[in-house]
Image (cartoon, helix red, strand yellow):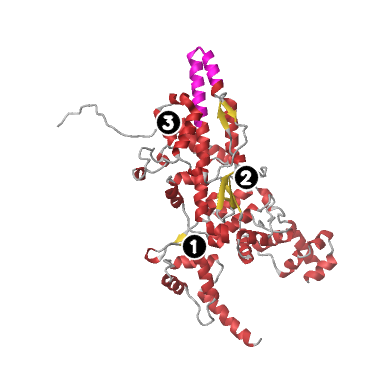
């Protein structure tokens, strides 16, 4: 029997150690402009070598994003000068490709950035650098009404254009839960039909809390009564004259509703059990206005002009002159080390902010390029889009694009949207042709059903066959899902309805 022994072995391997500076760079990318401003204020307070740049800001456009790498290197050198050379080689190499090098290992060899870092999504750290504040804070946080509605949106079976409409409606909900937007204005802004907006409003009014999305008190109470199966004709009549209820005009109410005074009293008692402001059950934190990070407008030649909102970009400078004077007066080692750390951190922060701004502009420019149809014609012209398409176009990793599109808003002629809302599902085409957007396929299904004859009701299988013949690769269950989202009955129900309409038409 062989004996048990010990031996020493040396193995070579590679691993990425996340330095505090790299963690900071990742964290800065996903912060909103408000959170970023707060973060920079904290850094200004604790780092004596950081100063505000009070010079007038020059808007950064998509043309600036394409400037040469050599120009950026000269700017970086001007910012850091020779003092930044004290940073470790790994940190320096990491910052040179802070986001552009955020590419999976298998794709690194395909581009000029073969020496860049590995995929940051696989890196684990003991610090919550991804922005998580821990379980305690997430449990203690008060859920806002908007957050509660958006959480239901994420699990609702909605098509891309309906999802955008619903987000626009959610943004118009006040703290009491009422819709404070004109539906026709929303339809015109999004380039869609009023009927589509009304249909999506019906979805919103089915969300919790019951009564949300109402446009007035009567509608709010009616939604709650309907949910309780108590909206009978007498109650519907009562809802039309709440002014009489407020005056306790029993004579007119009994005549209006067709019931006696005792029933009216019971109905009024039932109304008093309802919640006239359902939204107030959620967090009443101050409403923070959304400030866009990017502006999009049409240029004189018809092209879209994209520029960063300079008002949301913190402008910081490294005070090298102050560092030089203080470092000369420092005698002990601790003071010198403290100043060196402050200088390195300040340089890194300034570079990180610049890289963050350019990365947001890159991503926004590519999104606008893909969704030009939406900006020009409206919500029905959204194109299929996912994170990988944008990531491949700008040579970044999907995780970087995901961070950029969260909590970043873009102001367009169609309204204000979060960047992530432009990502839509796609339907594969036959024979390798270009994919179809889900909303375009949905419209074709609706058009087919609207044009069907009374004797030729299209089943879901028949719709699949017709779409396949047109080059759309779609499953039957997908057709059924889209049909249900359009609130169109099944072929059996439509056949029954049209059969019932035919005898009635004969007596007209």
Q: Position of residue 265 (x, y in %)?
A: 79, 62
Mark 3 or mark 2: whose residue is earlier in sequence: 3
- Does residue 127 appear in this view? no
Q: Position of residue 88 (x, y in %)?
A: 41, 27
Q: Which residue is mark 3?
A: 92
Check if residue 48 falls in the magenta segment: no
CA–CA distance in space, label 1 to label 3 = 45 Å
Element assignment for label 3? helix
Element assignment for label 1? helix
Q: Which residue is mark 1?
A: 438
Mark 1 or mark 2: whose residue is earlier in sequence: 2
Q: Would you say the residues marked 3 and 2 are in contact, meaning their CB atoms lie under 8 Å apart?
A: no
Q: Which residues are magenta?
A: 322-348
Q: Which residue is mark 2?
A: 291
Name the side, left or right, on which 261 lies relative to 324. right
Q: Would you say the residues marked 1 and 3 are in contact, meaning their CB atoms lie under 8 Å apart?
A: no
Mark 1 or mark 3: whose residue is earlier in sequence: 3
Q: Residues within 10 Å of mark 1 (few under 14, many from 20)?
A: many
Q: Look at discs 1 and 2 and give the one toward the viewer.
A: 2
The image quarter containing residue 49 is top right
Give the quarter of the figure containing the N terminus. Answer: top left
């Amino acid at each position: 029997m062989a004996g048990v022994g010990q031996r020493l072995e040396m193995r070579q391997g590679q691993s990425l150690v996340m330095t505090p500076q790299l963690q900071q760079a990742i964290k800065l990318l996903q912060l909103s402009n408000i959170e970023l401003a707060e973060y920079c204020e904290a850094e200004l307070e604790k780092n004596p070598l950081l100063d505000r740049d009070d010079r007038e800001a020059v808007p950064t456009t998509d043309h600036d994003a394409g400037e040469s790498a050599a120009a950026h290197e000269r700017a970086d050198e001007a910012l850091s000068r020779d003092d930044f050379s004290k940073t470790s080689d790994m940190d320096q190499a990491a910052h040179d490709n802070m986001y552009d090098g955020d590419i999976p290992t298998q794709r690194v060899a395909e581009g000029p950035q073969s020496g860049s870092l590995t995929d940051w999504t696989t890196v684990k750290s003991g610090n919550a650098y991804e922005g998580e504040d821990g379980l305690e804070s997430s449990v203690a946080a008060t859920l806002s009404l908007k957050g509660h509605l958006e959480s239901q949106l994420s699990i609702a079976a909605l098509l891309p254009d309906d999802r955008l409409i619903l987000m626009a409606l959610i943004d118009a909900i006040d703290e009491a839960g009422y819709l404070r937007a004109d539906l026709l204005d929303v339809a015109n802004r999004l380039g869609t039909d009023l009927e589509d907006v009304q249909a999506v409003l019906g979805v919103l009014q089915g969300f919790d809390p019951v009564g949300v999305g109402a446009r007035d008190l009567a509608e709010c109470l009616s939604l709650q009564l309907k949910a309780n199966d108590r909206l009978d004709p007498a109650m519907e009549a009562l809802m039309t004259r709440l002014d009489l209820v407020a005056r306790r005009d029993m004579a007119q109410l009994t005549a209006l509703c067709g019931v006696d005074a005792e029933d009216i009293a019971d109905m009024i008692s039932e109304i008093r059990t309802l919640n006239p402001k359902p939204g107030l059950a959620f967090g009443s934190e101050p409403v923070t206005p959304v400030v866009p990070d990017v502006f999009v407008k049409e240029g004189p030649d018809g092209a879209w002009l994209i520029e960063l909102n300079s008002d949301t970009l913190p402008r910081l400078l490294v005070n090298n002159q102050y560092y030089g004077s203080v470092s000369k007066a420092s005698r002990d080692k601790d003071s010198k080390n403290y100043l060196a750390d402050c200088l390195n951190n300040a340089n890194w922060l300034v570079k990180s902010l610049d890289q963050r701004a350019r990365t947001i502009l890159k991503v926004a420019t590519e999104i606008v390029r893909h969704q030009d149809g939406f900006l020009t014609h409206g919500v029905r012209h959204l194109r299929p889009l996912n994170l990988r398409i944008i990531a491949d176009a700008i040579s970044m990793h999907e995780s970087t694009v995901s961070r950029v599109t969260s909590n970043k808003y873009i102001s367009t002629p169609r309204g204000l949207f979060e960047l992530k809302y432009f990502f839509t599902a796609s339907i594969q085409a036959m024979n390798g042709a270009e994919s179809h957007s889900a909303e375009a396929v949905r419209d074709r299904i609706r058009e087919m059903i609207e044009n069907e004859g009374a004797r030729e009701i299209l089943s879901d299988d028949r719709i699949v066959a017709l779409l396949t013949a047109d080059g759309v690769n779609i499953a039957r269950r997908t057709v059924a899902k889209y049909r249900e989202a359009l609130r169109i009955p099944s072929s059996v129900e439509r056949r029954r309805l049209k059969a019932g309409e035919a005898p009635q038409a004969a007596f007209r």
